[in-house]
Amino acid sequence: MQLGMRKRGLRKWLNSAVRWPRVIGNNFDLMETTMSDTENADLEKFRSETRAWLEANCPPEMRKPATSDADVFWGGRNTKFSSEPQRIWFERMRDKGWTVPDWPKEYGGGGLSAAEHKVLRAEMAKMGARPPLSSFGIWMLGPALLKYGNEEQKKEHLPKIAAGLIRWCQGYSEPNAGSDLASLQTRAESDGDDFVITGQKIWTSYANYADWIFCLVRTDPAAKKHDGISFILFDMASKGVSTRPILLISGYSPFCETFFDGVRVPKSHVVGAVNRGWDVAKYLLQHERAMISGMGERGVGRPLGQIAADSIGTDAQGQLDDSMLRGQIASFEVDEAALAACAERAVDLAKAGQAHPAFSSAMKYYGTELNKRRYEILMSAGGVDALEWESERSRQGARPRAWLRTKANSIEGGTSEVMLGIVAKRILDLPGA
Amino acid sequence: MALVLTEEQSMLRDSARGLISDKAPVSHLRHLRDAKDPTGFSKELWQSFAEMGFAGLLVPEEFGGSGLGFVEAGIVMEEIGRTLMPSPFLATSVVAASSLNRGGNAAQKSEFLPKISSGSLLATLAVDEGAKHRPLQTSLKAVRAGNGFRLSGAKALVLDGHVADLLIVAARTAGAAGERDGLTLFLVNPKAKGVSIERTIMVDAHNAARIEFANVEVNADSVLGEVDQGGSLLDGVLDIGRGAVASEMVGLSEEVFHRTVEYLKGRKQFGKLIGEFQALQHRAAQLYVDIEITRAATMKALQALDTDVAKAASAVAVAKARAGTTATRAVQEGVQMHGGMGMTDQFDIGFFMKRARVCEELFGDANYHTAELARARGY
């Protein structure tokens, strides 16, 4: 063991914090080794060019977080831009392929390497630039299609996702298949070149706005429950599809019940092999969990301590005039910073080929519980002011509605209890889990 | 900087782990404790440490050291945490070596650093005075006397204080307790007149002392850094110590967790393995996540220290706070899940609980660092 060894270039490429959802989502399979000096110089060139381009092209209005759901651009057939800057920003990013920076160019992506993508994210984060397009197609379906789709499917769907032309929704959960997703009963019966789909989905996010659905259906009722499922894509405008929004405790309806009554779908729309849909579903779930776990780490907006100080006031030492809340906020921020480091490390482990495939479950568990804590603190910090539900002053109760919304974080995409079960079984190898 | 070990760092870890697990498993600590060993660690093993380049790991090569960074020091600390090996590494090789390297003049560095590298000099920082870690509250007084200073006061929790050859003493040369200005670090010979040292046998069977200074005279050359301006030097070396202790706690937490999960897979009650019970599975899974997150936060802090010690404070506060909370939880779950066995002295788990308690107090506990973060962020 020679300890005279020197650290080589460790400090060379310090990167600012990465954002978890998009990161993990797109880089799970990428391998990256240590960069040479030439590659490093190229990357620095890319960084300065990117920074200049963003400076020149990102409208000032797009350099702060979206304040409401309506302020987020989701794309789709019936989409409208909520503002001119939103349109400009989206179109400029789309034209560079940067709605999906690391997808291959042939599918409408930017063709960036993992390192370049990290630089772009870091530069966007520095500027506070918001994502130009939010999309389940980008976060969930895209990665699954890139891995499991055939060439025809990739060519058909990926460019439309990248260009924001088609808005997707996810048909997974059913009334009797929640945590136990694999017991789903929506059936797809073979009829010539088509499947005929009948059944019901629930918690379908924005199904009432979606153009297409990626859906889990049972194609072999006789097989064991994981072995008779297929992953299929179809148009929500197909005959026999109907949706009904579900009113939630937040007063919003982000989810729907979705009904299929003899919907006819060509068999060529199955992704992966018939009856092997569970593989695709699981792969996609990793991305969904990674996306949701990012919510606890979202360092947007003003720091909690400042929000609380404005609302509650400070004492003579400038400390928050509620020492217990101050402690809660600080503990939260310790955990938040630690989670951010862990998210960054998860990406680095994935690149180094050392990531455990079930680790996204661990992050999903922690990230969502942390986000719930954030909103409990925000409600406490807001006090009476955070109770108003309808006033202009409260932006129609934005805070209490967001607080209630977070309660779903640890349910959707697999409950915290299911996540812990996965960690126990797949990572800790505990018996009978 | 990626938050994974490089190939070279992995080699360092493997070699540290090889030596430590072979020569100093938990039974090594148990033996030293039961024998009431007057040194409290193995001098022979410390020589091996020096020969492998660990004693001078942070010391620049020109002074006979390995010239490595805090990430590497953290790697060794983590391995120490796995077996609870009592060793001068933390006090001498991390905290004292950093103090001398960062604050020392050319003469001080060339006098002491080569001896640290060769394993022939043990040194330690004496900072705490009260029950809790409050460096700014330092009230041990140093008044000018003749060409030098005269020190009066007392220090507690001086690591390896009973065997150290050199004390680095935080003293107040101006201002009042609570102020950052007016702190000065002094190099003090423990054999100097007026120094009395009481070895304190602690709950973890590691090594520390209380030291009294009764009009101890030191000359002007004994000042480490600048008179009255020692606050920032002290901040820096304390942060380095905190990062190192956080690493030890990560190693400790991981080891106790590993032992606990193995126990869950082997112990049967009610006709099944207790690891089949969902109540225990979920708690184990939560602890796993806590440890992973703490590990990442600790790596982040060590990298920040390597990049710029002066700017690493927040990352270090996060790491030490997290490490304290996580280790405390890990050892409690460890004892609880081992049931009655966990309460016996014969079983090693208790050693981990005891060491975690001491690590938690070392250089500030989770509450201290959480409050520091709030203060730094201005609320």
Image (cartoon, rainbow, N blue to C red):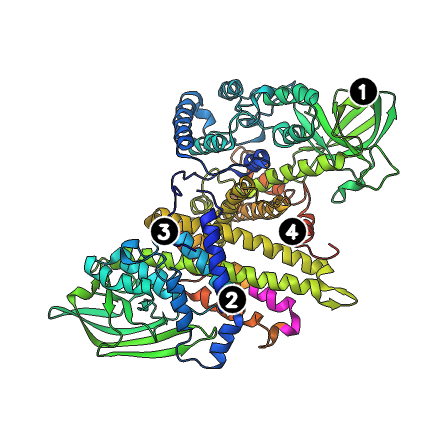
The kind of residue tagged 4 is Ile
Q: Determine whether, in the image, residue A211 is placed left or right of residue A350.
A: right
Crowdedness near tag 4: few (<14), some (14–19) or many (≥20) residues, C-alpha within 10 Å = some
Q: Which residue is mark 1?
A: A239
Magenta range is B331-341
The C terminus of chain A sits in image quarter: bottom right
Quote the CA–CA distance across marks 1 and 3.
63 Å
Kind of residue sitting beneath label 3: Gly
Q: Chain of mark 4?
A: A
Q: Name the one closer to the observer, A178 or A349.
A: A349
Q: Are marks 3 and 4 in contact (CB under 8 Å)?
A: no
- Residue lying at 43% horizontally and 38% vertically, measured from the top left: A15
Q: Secondary structure at mark 1?
A: loop
Q: Are marks 3 and 4 on the same chain?
A: yes
Q: Mark 1 or 2, which is nearer the eye?
A: 2
- Residue beneath label 3, please? A318
Residue in view at x 52 percent, y 28 percent: A131
Marks 4 & 2, CB-CB < 8 Å contact: no
Asked if marks 1 and 4 fall on the same chain, the answer is yes
Q: Does the segment drawn in magenta span residue A39?
A: no
Asked if the residues shown at circle 1 and circle 3 are in contact, with their CB atoms under 8 angstroms apart, the answer is no
Give the residue at mark 4: A427
User: What element does badge 4 sit on?
Assistant: helix
Q: Amino acid at mark 1?
A: Lys
Task: Place residue B183 in its image quadrant.
Answer: bottom left
* Measured Cα–Cα span from mark 4 to mark 2: 27 Å
